[in-house]
Image (tube, grey):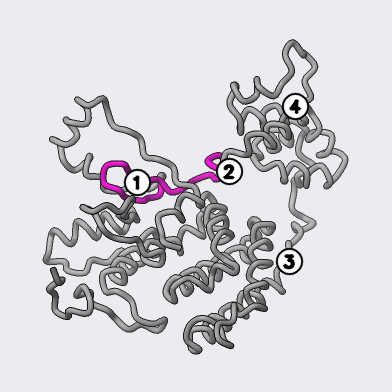
């Protein structure tokens, strides 16, 4: 049965021309409400309520699984805009999550994405470059993204019938944006603290330095600290540091499988690397905050911000959930699981 709409060739979506190209009107209005917190129609109470919820709680309903009854697909560029990834870059809790997501997408795979998705990803990467150069935050992750971006820049990327896949105007825009990002990266330098700034890290008591090191969750940071100076190296090599790191990433059952029985003298650094080699690092523990998936309304949202869930808005539905055994917590969505919602 044909789909009846204003135009049989499209689902009847309204499109608006912007400086960056054509955008869906509903997505554009959603992004404006996130940026400015403005209401589209002050006279309409229903729209006012929806906009107020959207401006404070960015979320996006997705199709988790396509069936005969539920057919559809998710658009990566639209989900990125609805979840306000642009502002999430400036949140230190979500910055590493955004970098990991870009790390999975940028490369040879980029040329196979749609034009809108390519623009959204490069806009995110440019925002990451602006934030990283201004705040000096996570230079290692930023440099890893730059290496992939340079490979994409030299390949152009992938020739198809003698030219890049996509319109010539689109790739001119991409090239200009890539050149701006690489130019920012060439001027990026880690600034040393001012000589009059006191106290410095090494001037803190040893107990304070140890507490800082105990809160590092990435073993690469410990390795870098070990190479920094003798004082930090002596703390990093303590058994307590590696014991706490091992217990952070692995459960007791996994640790018991690796550790020898009846051995009081445990080398926790060797135990950590053995657990890492056997089980791999828990991806859920590598980020201060991740996206979450609500099992009731099928919404992706940032856990710290929440979302307007149907379980909270419908008392009858809440009562039925309580009778069924209580509310199931939302599922964390690491970057690799996030990309599985899209046809990439």
Please tell me whether residue 157 is drawn above or below residue 309 in the rendered image. below
Give the Cα distance between marks 3 and 4: 35 Å
The nearer-to-camera label among 3 and 4 is 4
Which comes before the other along the chain, label 3 or label 1? 3
Give the Cα distance between marks 3 and 1: 37 Å
In reply to whether residue 285 is colored magenta, the answer given is yes
Give the Cα distance between marks 1 and 2: 21 Å
Which comes before the other along the chain, label 2 or label 3? 3
Residue at x 67% of width, y 34% of height = 278
Residue at x 77% of width, y 30% of height = 270
Which comes before the other along the chain, label 3 or label 4? 3
Residue 306 marker: 1
| Residue position marked by numbered label 2 in the rendering | 286
Q: Front-most of 55 and 172?
A: 172
| Residue position marked by numbered label 4 in the rendering | 268
The nearer-to-camera label among 2 and 3 is 2
């Amino acid at each position: 049965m044909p789909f009846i709409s204003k135009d049989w060739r499209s689902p009847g979506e309204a499109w608006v021309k912007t400086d960056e190209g054509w955008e869906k009107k509903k997505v554009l209005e959603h992004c404006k409400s996130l940026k400015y917190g403005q209401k589209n129609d002050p006279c309409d109470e229903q729209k006012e309520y929806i906009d107020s919820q959207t401006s404070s709680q960015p979320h996006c309903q997705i199709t988790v699984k396509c069936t005969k009854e539920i057919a559809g697909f998710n658009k990566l560029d639209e989900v990125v805009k609805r979840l306000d990834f642009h502002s999430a870059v400036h949140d230190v809790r979500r910055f590493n999550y955004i970098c990991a997501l870009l790390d999975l997408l940028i490369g040879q795979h980029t040329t196979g994405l749609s034009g809108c998705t390519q623009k959204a990803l490069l806009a995110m990467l440019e925002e990451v470059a602006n934030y990283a150069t201004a705040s000096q935050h996570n230079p290692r992750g930023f440099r890893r993204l730059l290496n992939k971006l340079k490979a994409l820049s030299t390949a152009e990327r992938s020739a198809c019938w003698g030219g890049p896949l996509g319109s010539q105007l689109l790739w001119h825009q991409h090239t200009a944006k890539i050149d701006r990002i690489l130019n920012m990266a060439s001027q990026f330098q880690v600034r040393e603290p001012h000589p009059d700034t006191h106290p410095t890290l090494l001037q803190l008591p040893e107990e304070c330095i140890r507490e800082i090191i105990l809160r590092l969750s990435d073993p690469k940071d410990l390795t870098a600290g070990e190479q920094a100076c003798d004082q930090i190296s002596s703390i990093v090599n303590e058994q307590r540091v590696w014991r706490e790191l091992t217990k952070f990433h692995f459960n007791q059952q996994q640790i018991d499988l690796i550790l020898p029985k009846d051995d009081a003298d445990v080398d926790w650094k060797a135990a950590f690397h053995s657990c890492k080699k056997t089980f791999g690092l828990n991806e859920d523990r590598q980020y201060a905050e991740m996206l979450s998936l609500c099992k009731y309304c099928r919404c992706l949202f940032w856990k710290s911000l929440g979302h307007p869930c149907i379980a909270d808005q419908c008392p009858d539905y809440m009562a039925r959930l309580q009778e069924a055994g209580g509310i199931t917590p939302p599922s964390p969505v690491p970057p690799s699981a996030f990309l599985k919602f899209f046809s990439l």
